[in-house]
Image (cartoon, helix red, strand yellow):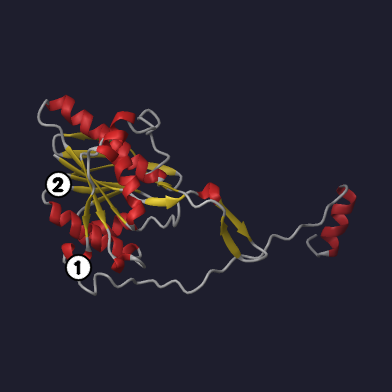
Amino acid sequence: MKIIACVKQVLDPHGIVVNRKAEKVFVNREEYILDPASKAALQVAVAVKAAVSESNGSTPPEIVAISLGPDRVDDVLREAMAFGADRAILLKDAAFENADALVVANALAAAIGKIGAFDLILLGARSLDSGSGELAPRLAEALDLPQLNNVVSLDIKDNTISAVCAAGDSFVRVSANLSVVVSVDPVGDWSRLSQHPNGWRLMDAYKEWRVEVWSAADLGLSEDDLRPMAVKKEDAFPPERQRGTRIKDAKELVAVLKRERVI
């Protein structure tokens, strides 16, 4: 069994300050972290690996962590190996600089195709920076695979995955045959899983293990594959919230409502 875990590095929001009046975002401390949803996907991958190994006693599943970005993304891939990933691949190319969800999905699909046979693809349902939640559906479409989105718990038996998915204010139970794309909700039932990478594995990740680096050429991506659908032109901020009128008592409230012709 082979599990693909797609992970993402994001800017730590604790170092970001928004000034609405100046309509600017200030990065007071530029530090990057493993996206919480990606962390949940890694936790699930490791839990599935352990469960499958225990149930059939065969060769443990292999976890392959993949991420796209510049050199600094190497850190989250080594963190992924510390969590339990057996292999890490960084997709790095100048052509990815302005990549949107479509380009990222194309690149990930090409990388997964190059890796070969797989059974399960895990990734976060919504990243901390954009929160769009569109990568998993695009990746499933690019690979022509079924998808289970916003998964809060799952179980795998034989060749079938059963999952509970968040659907608005309710939940639905669904199932699918492997291979499948699963987007993991970061607020799902993962609190029982390890919240921190193994310290010894973290040291080995930097001292002993290596991260493979693949370019756009290695993936055989065309110009159309690398052309984003969305182009960022500028930032726009909503107006600063205006303070309301302070009402002293019920009598004054009635007077204001009459003046505004509410009553």
Q: Quadrant of residue 109?
A: bottom left
**Which image quarter is the N terminus in?**
top left
The structure residue drawn at horizontal position 78% and vertical position 61%, both measured from the top left corner, is 262
The structure residue drawn at horizontal position 46% and vertical position 45%, both measured from the top left corner, is 169
The reply to whether residue 150 is in sight is: no
Task: Residue type at mark 1: give it.
Answer: Leu
- Quick one: label 1 or label 2, which is nearer the N terminus? 2
**Which image quarter is the C terminus in?**
bottom right
Q: Quadrant of residue 23?
A: bottom right
Q: Which residue is mark 1?
A: 221
The reply to whether residue 102 is in sight is: yes
Name the spot of residue 202 as percent of width and height, x first: 31, 35
Name the spot of residue 58 as percent of width and height, x first: 9, 29
Between 193 and 260, the residue placed more toward the observer is: 193
In this rendering, position of residue 200 left or right of residue 30: left
At mark 1, the secondary structure is: loop
Viewer-side label of 1, 2: 1
At mark 2, the secondary structure is: loop
Q: Quadrant of residue 244?
A: bottom right
229 over 185 or under it: above or below? below
Cα distance in 3D space between marks 1 and 2: 21 Å
Between 109 and 201, the residue placed more toward the observer is: 201
The structure residue drawn at horizontal position 35% and vertical position 58%, both measured from the top left corner, is 134
| Residue 118 disc label | 2
Binning the other alpha carbons within 10 Å of mark 2 as few (below 14), some (14 to 19) or many (20 upward) gives: some
